[in-house]
Image (tube, helix red, strand yellow):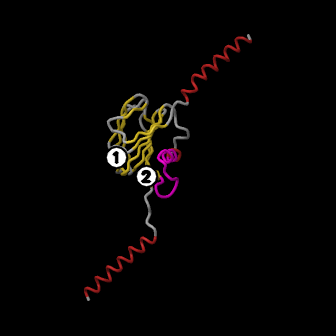
Amino acid sequence: MNTTKHAVLGFCLAVSACLAPLAQAASWVEITDPAMSGFLVGGKTVTYGSVAADSVWVYDGANPSGAQNAAAIQSLVSSKFGLPSSGTGSLVFAAQGDLESSKSGSFIVKSSFDYLAVHYGRGELLFHWDTPLAANTVFSLANLPRGLSNFRAFNSVSAVPEPATYGMLMLGLGLVGFVARRRRA
């Protein structure tokens, strides 16, 4: 009986040793200048549209660590693209939606956005555009290795002019008004 326990324990350890690398196999891969006509994800050529992204991060084979709520995904997108957590260049939530679980599909993002996270099966696609996409953009994906789940869209915060900039603007407008009034007199 003691030999049977050792054999079962040995078998379990061998199986877990073989499966452990598979559980850790997923890693982030950056695709710069990703063609809309396709890039590889899980051995499949994934296509997307309607506007070519400037870069895409792919995580395939396991769920990324953390939850799927908007705040967790926002933090994930910020870290992958090297964005600050607050201030100029940081992200603000724009839109989200649940998707039908199919390997291809399209959805409408009702707000303007320049970062998009799409969750599918055990993976994540993170898209970035240098120029924000307009509200009501139809976004499509085809030939994913597993079914779609949800999306989260974000905008990067643009710089807000400092008070001195507004002061200079007011001074310039006042000067133009003064010159125009002197010419009339």
Few, some or many C-alpha atoms within 10 Å of disc 1 (few <14, some 14-19, many ≥20)? some
Q: Which mark is residue 137?
A: 1
Q: Dividing the picture into quarters, in which one does residue 185 lie?
A: bottom left
Residue 28 locus on image (x, y percent): 48, 37
Q: Residue at x 56, y 40 (%)?
A: 66
Q: Quadrant of the N terminus?
A: top right
Residue 102 locus on image (x, y percent): 40, 31
Residue type marked 1: Thr
What residue did someone put label 2 on?
155
Residue 76 colored magenta?
yes
Q: Which mark is residue 175?
A: none
Residue type marked 2: Asn
Few, some or many C-alpha atoms within 10 Å of disc 2 (few <14, some 14-19, many ≥20)? many
Relative to 12, residue 23 above or below:
below
Indicate the secondary structure of the residue bearing disc 2. Answer: strand
Relative depth, front residue between 107 and 178: 178
Residue 13 colored magenta?
no
Residue bounds of the magenta highlight: 74-90
Q: Residue at x 35, y 38 (%)?
A: 48
User: As drawn, which residue projects farthest toward the front?
Assistant: 32
Alpha carbon distance from label 1 to label 2: 14 Å
